[in-house]
Image (cartoon, rainbow, N blue to C red):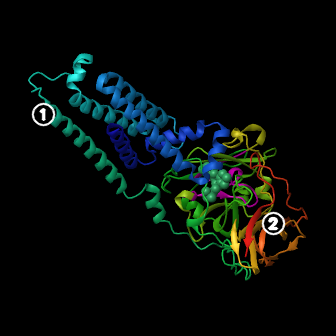
Amino acid sequence: MLAAAAGVAVSALAAGLLTGVPAPIISVGNAAVDLAPPALKDFAVEQFGTLDKPILLGGIIVVIAVVAAAAGLIGLRHPRAALALTGLLGGLAVLAAATDRTSLTAAPVTVVPAVLALVTSLVALASMLSRLSRREAAESAPWLEAHPGDDVGADFDRRKFIEAVLATGAVTAAAGIATRFLGGTAAVASRGAVRIPMPADRAGAVPAGAQLRVPGITPYLTNNDDFYRIDTALTPPDVPTDGWTLRIHGMVDREIELDFTALLQRRLVERRVTLTCVSIEVGGDLAGNATWIGVPLSELLAEAGVQDGADALLSTSADGFTAGTPISAVTDGRDAMIAIAMNGEPLPIIHGFPARMVVPGLYGYVSATKWLTEIEVTRFADFTAYWTDRDWAEQAPIKTFSRIDVPGSFAQLKAGSNAVAGVAWAQERGIDRVEVRVDGGDWQPARLGAADGLATWRQWVVEWDAEPGSHELEVRATDATGEVQPSERVPPRPDGATGWQSVSVTVT
Ligand SMILES: Nc1nc2c(c(=O)[nH]1)N[C@H]1C(S)=C(S)[C@@H](COP(=O)(O)O)O[C@H]1N2
Ligand SMILES: [Mo]
């Protein structure tokens, strides 16, 4: 296990020193994510939510530890078998590193950390086994026998073994500590140097009354630190602005290629947009409302000249994620953009630094590509994307949604006046009405927070005169086309969940 830990630590340090190379353990995790059958992925997301990644990494560490422990036990009698098992583990790491779509470097560099993991763990294991098991192993592996002139006594063996253990432990600890203090990636340094210019077209102040004064309600604007995060990469790709470009190509009259400076020099707009993940369950929280600054996508497309017959944008990220967005959703007047800032800061690394797409009204998996590098103007008939390859719908406008933030599930309330409040959204259609009912009674209209364009959620509140007993509260919204949120419960796959949320409370 110590030999395996040394391999993991040394390879993580090597990956930290090489720009754009994920640590091999992360590559193994990425391979697991990509190879997992859709049903297993759904299960993991349902059970663990956004904790699925730490749990996956924990699972990988447990598997490595178990295999390594087995190798150690086997090694007492069969050192060759132990080395073969360890070699197999290291070999899988090399394979995962070689095929990791999130790596930003060419093949030979990409596998350097994994090869180091392989070599380190083999050397450490061999050195420890050769000290520990000299006598037991002598019969099974003559090549591990004492070198001529070695003093083969019990004390000598123990001392040498302890030396080998301490040396391996020291290498592991030193690599671990050095990785810790490495001081961040190239993207972190690059982000620190970015200054976002004042946008030509500002968002204006949040309308008075958009933020209701109800304790416990979801804040109207979501802080970057509280913003949900969904991506397929176990660690965000390391993309400094230096060397980054965005290429717009495909069915266009003129290809466009912009570096980060050129992007900043274009006309910038600032807009509030609520992003939503298609995986959100009834009552779920995979949505957030932020102020974005970016370059209007419609202007870039107009400049490139979209050719007849094109109906899709295939966007690609530095980590190999892809998404297909209808061109109509980008050119119909809504504020689709290449975003470079979120809530007054350069995009946080995990939210797509240096640039990402934001398209109001579409779920993130078909529109919100982070670490964006490429947009191909094309036809839906001619490609599939990361999630459409995994049974999710090609077209995915955001469905009308309403959520009760307060009271929480199974809350204990005092009889009398209580606020029932939350948020609702129907991006690009608008929320016209939110209603609440108690114990299946009549629907009561909620007071809505001030509207702030069509791209954002809206808060709502109902004053409820609660009587003692157990009660069930339900909520539903109606969008501005008059469509009532359906009561029928459907799961998120393939194009978003529906159903009314209900919350049980006790009033005393
Ligand atoms: N490169 C990349 N971009 C991505 C994803 C991803 O996995 N990789 N996930 C998408 C999904 S499913 C959603 S819901 C949004 C989430 O954006 P956020 O993590 O900034 O909240 O990003 C989208 N962009
Ligand atoms: Mo998503």
Quarter placement of the N terminus: top left
Vertical relation: 126 (above or below) 428 = above
Tell whether position 439 is magenta: no
Q: Earlier in the sequence, mark 1 or mark 2?
A: 1
Mark 1 to mark 2 CA distance (whole Å): 75 Å
Q: Percent position (x, y) of residue 240?
A: 48, 55
Q: Is mark 1 within 8 Å of ligand 1?
A: no
Residue for badge 2? 475
Q: In the figure, is residue 80 to the left or right of 315?
A: left
Q: Quadrant of residue 297?
A: bottom right
The residue depicted at 31 percent of the width and 48 percent of the height is: 175
Q: Which mark is residue 479?
A: none
> Which secondary structure lies at badge 1?
helix
Is residue 257 visible from the viewing direction of this image? no
Q: Residues within 10 Å of mark 2 (few under 14, many from 20)?
A: many
Instruction: Name the amino acid type tagged 2.
Output: Val
Q: In the figure, is residue 494 to the left or right of 55?
A: right
The residue depicted at 17 percent of the width and 35 percent of the height is: 158
Residue for badge 1? 155
Start-end of magenta stretch? 351-377
Q: Percent position (x, y) of residue 37?
A: 64, 36
